[in-house]
């Protein structure tokens, strides 16, 4: 009897502990020092962050999407169900117009909503957590200058148990690492800038890496490509293992080729980007040449990693 | 003897026509491959890796025009899957838009061929076709396979 009670107490204690460990974390307003927003930098963060790719109101013709009308609604299919990108326009009722700056920092750094609930990592805070505080605040200030769009996006349609937000807390314990990118003094300023843009706001690895059965990136094969999360096609390996033999005609990519591709969408074999990458290039084509060159230099410097085998070449 | 040679030839011809009709996926891939090979030549000239050559520039646009003319017939209903196709099923849901894009691709290529005189005009025309016609259509209707 006594042993049973001890066991019950231990289980209860474990549950309480787990409850606390999976509580959504927040950033208090008091943690934000005075800051004068730089709207130009905010726009750069918006472009490299790819906000428009998911949050701009969709149009049947991708070329007609207005990148600054962030009414949300795009469906993101995944093995766990369908996510619908929310409205992040400055509309106070349907968008983020009523959010405080701390709410916004909390969403990107902690993956927690203003109502104190876990956000699903379909919103790539796993990468945005690497962003510098000043960049997030500039982005917030820039978003505030965009037109408000009325209307809420549909609710996510997720299969049980993935629809339980509290379980995202367990997922975060396992797979989510906080903390902004720390520059590596052994690397050049350009490669550090590229590493920051790629791993932070750019969130390139979110598509260009294989994922495990819980949807987390397999870190040992980061950037090594894998099947697309929506089940349509295959995302290429962007380490030298992939880019060295990529494209048609086995054309190896140079750093300059990567930068050109991010500006114009043309790869070294003369092919033009399609699908989701064309959407990414809509964003990266807005960046300055120096940032594109930094991204290219970093990608070019990645160690070669073998990824899942792509389907045979068409 | 001569008659049987004719018969064999006729059958062979018939079979090869039938193959072309039955395998639109292979045929459209060959067109895209030809486009890509030409675009690569264009890219080399733009990047300064090869000298500008007006004849080559015109051949690029002629190849594009040819592909745009032939492609609409190569997406019959029975070619939605198979042969490692990278064609998105959305093509068949939006066939009118898809064909309109191909038509625009063809007319843009034709216009470019007439306009281009030097490297600068080539850069502008080739860049616009690449981004809007090639890129725009790939974004909408191609599934990346590798």
Image (spheres, coloured by chain):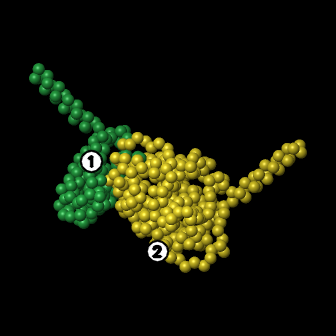
Chain colours: A yellow, B green
The quarter of the picture where the N terminus of chain A appears is top right
Horizontal and vertical percent position of residue A78: 52, 50
How many numbered discs? 2
**Residue under label 2:** A40
Q: Residue furthest top?
A: B1
Q: Residue furthest left?
A: B2
Q: CA distance from mark 2 to mark 1?
A: 42 Å
The residue under the point 40% across, 41% down is A312
The residue under the point 35% across, 57% down is A266
Q: Nearer the viewer, residue B130 or B138?
A: B130
Is residue A310 visible to us here?
A: yes
In this rendering, the answer to whether B30 lies above or below A264 is: above
Q: Secondary structure at mark 2?
A: helix
Q: Residues within 10 Å of mark 2 (few under 14, many from 20)?
A: few
Q: Nearer the viewer, residue B119 or A108?
A: B119
Q: Secondary structure at mark 1?
A: helix
Horizontal and vertical percent position of residue A57: 44, 63
Q: Is residue A15 left or right of residue B57?
A: right
* Disc number placed over residue A114 in the picture, else none: none
The residue under the point 86% across, 47% down is A5
Chain identity of mark 1: B
Dot 2 and dot 1 within a common chain: no
Horizontal and vertical percent position of residue A216: 58, 51
Chain identity of mark 2: A
The quarter of the picture where the C terminus of chain A appears is top left
**Residue under label 1:** B34
Is residue B107 visible to us here?
A: no
In this rendering, the answer to whether B74 lies above or below A22 is: above
The residue under the point 14% across, 24% down is B5
Q: Residue furthest right?
A: A2
């Amino acid at each position: 009897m006594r042993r049973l009670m001890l066991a019950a107490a231990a289980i209860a204690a474990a549950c309480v502990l787990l409850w606390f460990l999976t509580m959504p974390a927040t950033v208090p307003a008091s943690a934000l020092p005075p800051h004068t927003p730089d709207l130009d930098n905010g726009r750069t963060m918006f472009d490299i962050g790819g906000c428009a790719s998911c949050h701009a109101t969709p149009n049947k013709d991708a070329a007609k999407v207005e990148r600054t009308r962030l009414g949300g609604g795009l469906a993101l299919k995944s093995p766990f169900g369908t996510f619908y990108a929310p409205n992040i326009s400055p509309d106070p009722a349907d968008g983020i117009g009523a959010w405080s700056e701390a709410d916004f920092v909390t969403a990107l750094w902690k993956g927690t909503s203003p109502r104190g609930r876990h956000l699903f990592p379909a919103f790539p805070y796993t990468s945005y957590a690497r962003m510098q505080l000043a960049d997030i605040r500039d982005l917030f200030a820039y978003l505030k200058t965009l037109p408000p769009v009325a209307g809420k996006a549909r609710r996510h349609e997720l299969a049980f148990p993935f629809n339980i937000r509290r379980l995202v807390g367990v997922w975060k314990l396992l797979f989510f690492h906080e903390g902004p990118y720390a520059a590596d003094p052994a690397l050049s300023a350009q490669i550090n800038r590229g590493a920051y843009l790629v791993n932070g706001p750019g969130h390139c690895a979110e598509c260009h890496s294989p994922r495990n059965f819980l949807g987390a990136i397999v870190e040992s094969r980061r950037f090594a490509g894998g099947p697309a999360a929506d089940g349509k096609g295959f995302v290429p390996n962007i380490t030298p293992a992939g880019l060295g033999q990529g494209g048609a005609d086995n054309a190896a990519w140079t750093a300059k080729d990567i930068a050109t591709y991010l500006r114009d969408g043309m790869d070294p074999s003369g092919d033009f980007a399609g699908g989701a990458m064309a959407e990414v290039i809509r964003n990266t084509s807005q960046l300055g040449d120096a940032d594109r060159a930094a991204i290219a230099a970093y990608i070019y410097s990645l160690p070669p990693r073998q990824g899942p085998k792509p389907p045979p070449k068409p | 003897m001569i008659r049987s040679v004719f018969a064999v030839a006729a059958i062979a011809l018939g079979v090869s026509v039938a193959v072309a009709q039955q395998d639109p996926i292979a045929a459209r891939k060959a067109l895209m491959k030809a486009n890509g090979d030409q675009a690569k030549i264009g890219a080399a000239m733009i990047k300064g890796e090869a000298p500008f050559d007006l004849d080559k520039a015109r051949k690029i646009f002629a190849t594009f025009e040819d592909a745009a003319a032939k492609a609409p017939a190569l997406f019959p209903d029975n070619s939605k899957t198979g042969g490692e196709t990278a064609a998105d099923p959305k093509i068949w849901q939006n066939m009118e838009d898809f064909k309109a894009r191909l038509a625009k691709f063809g007319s843009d290529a034709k216009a470019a061929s007439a306009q281009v005189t030097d490297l600068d005009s080539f850069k502008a025309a080739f860049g616009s076709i690449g981004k809007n016609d090639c890129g725009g259509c790939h974004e909408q209707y191609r599934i990346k396979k590798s």
